[in-house]
Amino acid sequence: MADEQVYDDGRAEILREMLRTLANRIQALDASGQLLANGGELMKLIGDVRSELFHYEVRCTFDSPEVAEHRRLVEEARGTDEHPWTTTGWKPGDEENEW
């Protein structure tokens, strides 16, 4: 299951090749005057590339449990777990004094 969550170099190269193939096919169809006549083929290629790009975007930003734990430990060591809210000085009952 971990393999599904990590986008390795081999899969990234496959995505690059898919993008190059799409670009080459578009150029070839355009050069032969068949660009718009092959809309169905292009839609399928674009759909495949789009799907793979989505997986790349999702998985390349995924933190494995180990990385997430390391990130948490570093943040804890830096003291970044302080409460992010600042006090305003408001106290219960203050709204009654404003009238």
Image (cartoon, rainbow, N blue to C red):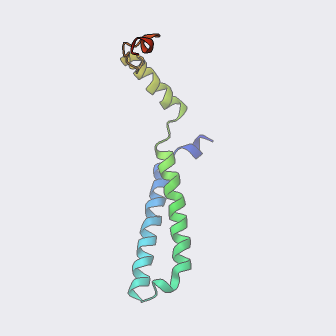
Rendered-image quadrant of the C terminus = top left
Q: Is residue 95 visible?
A: yes
Question: Among all residues in the image, which is located at the extreme front?
Answer: 99
Report which quarter residue 20 is drawn in.
Answer: bottom left
Q: Nearer the viewer, residue 85 or 71?
A: 85
Rendered-image quadrant of the N terminus = top right
Rendered view: 6 above or below 31:
above
Q: Position of residue 54 (x, y in %)?
A: 51, 54
Q: Position of residue 47 (x, y in %)?
A: 54, 66
**Picture residue at 45% right of the left edge, 71% below the top:** 21
Q: Position of residue 5 (x, y in %)?
A: 56, 43
Report which quarter residue 80 is drawn in.
Answer: top left
**Picture residue at 40% right of the left edge, 13% below the top:** 90
Q: Position of residue 37 (x, y in %)?
A: 50, 86
Task: Report the label total.
Answer: 0
Report which quarter residue 97 is drawn in.
Answer: top left
Q: Nearer the viewer, residue 44 or 28?
A: 44
Q: Is residue 7 visible?
A: no
Q: Nearer the viewer, residue 67 or 35?
A: 35
**Picture residue at 46% right of the left edge, 10% below the top:** 93
Rendered view: 70 above or below 23:
above
Question: Among all residues in the image, which is located at the extreme right?
Answer: 1
Question: Among all residues in the image, which is located at the extreme bottom?
Answer: 33
**Picture residue at 47% right of the left edge, 50% below the top:** 57
